[in-house]
Amino acid sequence: MTNNCCENACACGCGSSRENKLCTLTKPHNQFDIGKIMPLVKDPKYFCRCCGRLANKAENLCNPILLKDK
């Protein structure tokens, strides 16, 4: 099994605290509170270069980049 961004240590090397990050809030897998997650992802403007998650605010991702409008 390979280590990814969301396991023990962030593999992308971002060094960010994962408190209030989607990678932490969506643990344990398939057992998280979807009611807390949906408001954070309903109108995504940022993409995490580490894990590929999308979020409304950069602060909810470890390594965010702004999604560009088409």
Image: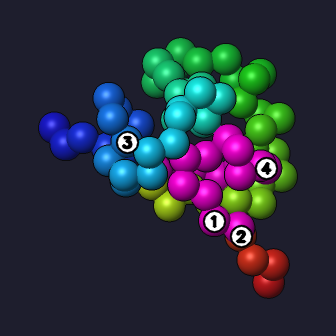
Kindly report which numbered mark, 3 or 2, lies closer to the viewer in this rendering. 3
Mark 3 vs mark 4, CA separation in Å: 21 Å
Q: Which residues are magenta?
A: 51-66
Q: What color scheme is it?
A: rainbow
Residue drawn where x is 70% and y is 24% of the image: 34
Kindly report which numbered mark, 2 or 1, lies closer to the viewer in this rendering. 1
Q: Is residue 36 magenta?
A: no
Q: Give the number of the disc on residue 56.
A: 4
In-image side of 49 versus 56 (left or right): left
Q: Secondary structure at mark 1?
A: strand
* Residue at which label 1 appears: 65
Residue 36, x across and y down, in percent: 75, 23
In-image side of 35 versus 3 (left or right): right
**Which amino acid type corresponds to the residue marked 4 in the rendered image?**
Asn
Q: Which of disc 2 and disc 4 is earlier in sequence?
A: 4
* Residue at which label 2 appears: 67
Note whether 27 is above or below 11 in the view shown. above
Mark 1 vs mark 4, CA separation in Å: 11 Å
Q: Mark 4 packing: few (<14 Cα in 10 Å), some, or many (20+)?
A: some
Q: Which of disc 2 and disc 3 is earlier in sequence?
A: 3
Residue 7, x across and y down, in percent: 34, 32
* Extreme residue in the bottom direction: 70
Q: Quadrant of residue 20?
A: top right
Q: Which of disc 3 and disc 1 is earlier in sequence?
A: 3
Q: Mark 3 packing: few (<14 Cα in 10 Å), some, or many (20+)?
A: some
* Residue at which label 3 appears: 10
